[in-house]
Amino acid sequence: MATALPDITGHVLVRQRHWGRWTAVAVILLLLTLLARAFAAGQIEWQVVGQFLTAPVIMAGLVNTVVMSIAAMALGIVLGVVAAVMRMSHNPVLQGAALGYAWLFRGTPVILQLLLWFNLALIFPTIGIPGLWSARTVEVMTPAFAALLGLGLNQGAYTSEVFRAGMLSVDQGQYEAAKAIGMTRLRALRRIVFPQAMRVVIPPLGNEFIGMVKLTSLASVIQYTEILHSAQNIYYANSRVIELLIVAAIWYLAVVSVLTPLQMLLERRFARGTVGGR
C-alpha cells in the first residue's frame, strides 16, 4: 500500500542566501578601493603619465615590441614545426637533435640566451661563409638581430612541444589511412595531420604569443628599443620612474587586450564541429 505524500501547498519558497558570495564581493571591492586610494593619494604625477603616454619615443618602442613579437613568434613556429616533425620521426639521429634543441633552449634562461647572442663577437670575431662572404660579428649581431635569435630560438623549443602534442592528439588511424592511399609522410602531415592538430595547437600557441609580447621586455638588457627600454631612457633623464613604468604597463595591457579576443576567435574557428565549438 502506497504511503500518502505530505501536503506542501502551504509552504513558502525561500530563496537561498549566498552569504559567501556577498562576503567575497565586499572583500574584493574593499581591496580595490584601498588600492585605488593608494594610487590616487600617492606621489604619482598622473599628468606625467598622460604626457608621455603617446610620446614619439614610446610609440616607436610600441611598434618595435609588436614587430619583434611577430617576427620572433614566426621564427619560433617554423622551428617548432621542424623540431616536432623531427621528434616524431623514426630516425634516431633526428629525434636526438630535436631533443637536444629543446633541452638546451628550455634549460637556460631567456635573458642568458639574449646576452650570449649579443656578445657572440667575444667568441667569434668574424662570421660568414669561407670564400664567399664574411663580416665582423659585432656589426651583424645588432640588438634587433640578437633579440630575434634569442627570443625566436627559445620560443621554437617550447613551440615544438605544443605542435608535438597536437600531432599526438590525431588518431593513429589517420596516419595509417594516409599511408594506405599512397601519401608520403610530409604530404600526410600537411594535408591531414596538421589541419586536425590545429584545434589542439591554437590555444597554447595563442598564449605563447601573448607571452612573447611581454617577453620582449627582456630585450631591453641588450639595448633593443622596445617599450620598456624607451620608458627607461625617459625616466633616466627625468627621474619619474613610476610614471614611466605605468605608461609601459598601460601599453602592454592594451596590446594583450587586443590579442586576447583575436585568440578566442581563432580558437572558435578551429574548434568548429567539436563539442563546445560553433
Image (spheres, grey):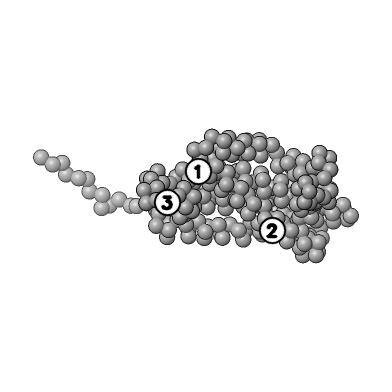
Secondary structure beneath dot 3 equals loop
Contact between marks 3 and 2 (CB within 8 A): the answer is: no
Residues under labels 3 and 2: Cα distance? Answer: 39 Å
Residues under labels 1 and 2: Cα distance? Answer: 27 Å
Q: Position of residue 9 (x, y in %)?
A: 25, 53
Q: Tag 2: residue type?
A: Val
Secondary structure beneath dot 1 equals helix
Q: Which residue is mark 1?
A: 165
Identity of the residue furthest to the left in this view: 1
Contact between marks 1 and 3 (CB within 8 A): the answer is: no
Please tell me whether residue 168 is drawn above or below residue 256 in the rendered image.
Answer: above
Q: Position of residue 80 (x, y in %)?
A: 59, 47
Alpha-carbon neighbours of circle 1 within 10 Å: few (<14), some, or many (≥20)?
A: some
Q: Tag 3: residue type?
A: Met
Q: Tag 1: residue type?
A: Ala
8 vs 129, left or right, is left
> Foreground residue, 62 or 32?
62
Residue 54's disc number: none
| Residue appearing at x 45%, y 49% in the figure | 184
Quadrant for the C terminus, please. Answer: bottom left
| Residue appearing at x 71%, y 48% in the figure | 149
190 vs 111, left or right, is left
Q: Which residue is mark 3?
A: 183
Contact between marks 1 and 2 (CB within 8 A): the answer is: no
Q: Position of residue 66 (x, y in %)?
A: 69, 58
| Residue appearing at x 39%, y 51% in the figure | 182
Q: Which residue is mark 2?
A: 66
Report whether residue 172 is seen: yes
| Residue appearing at x 80%, y 49% in the figure | 134
Residues under labels 1 and 3: Cα distance? Answer: 22 Å
In primary-sequence order, the first of circles 3 and 2 is 2
Report whether residue 128 is seen: no
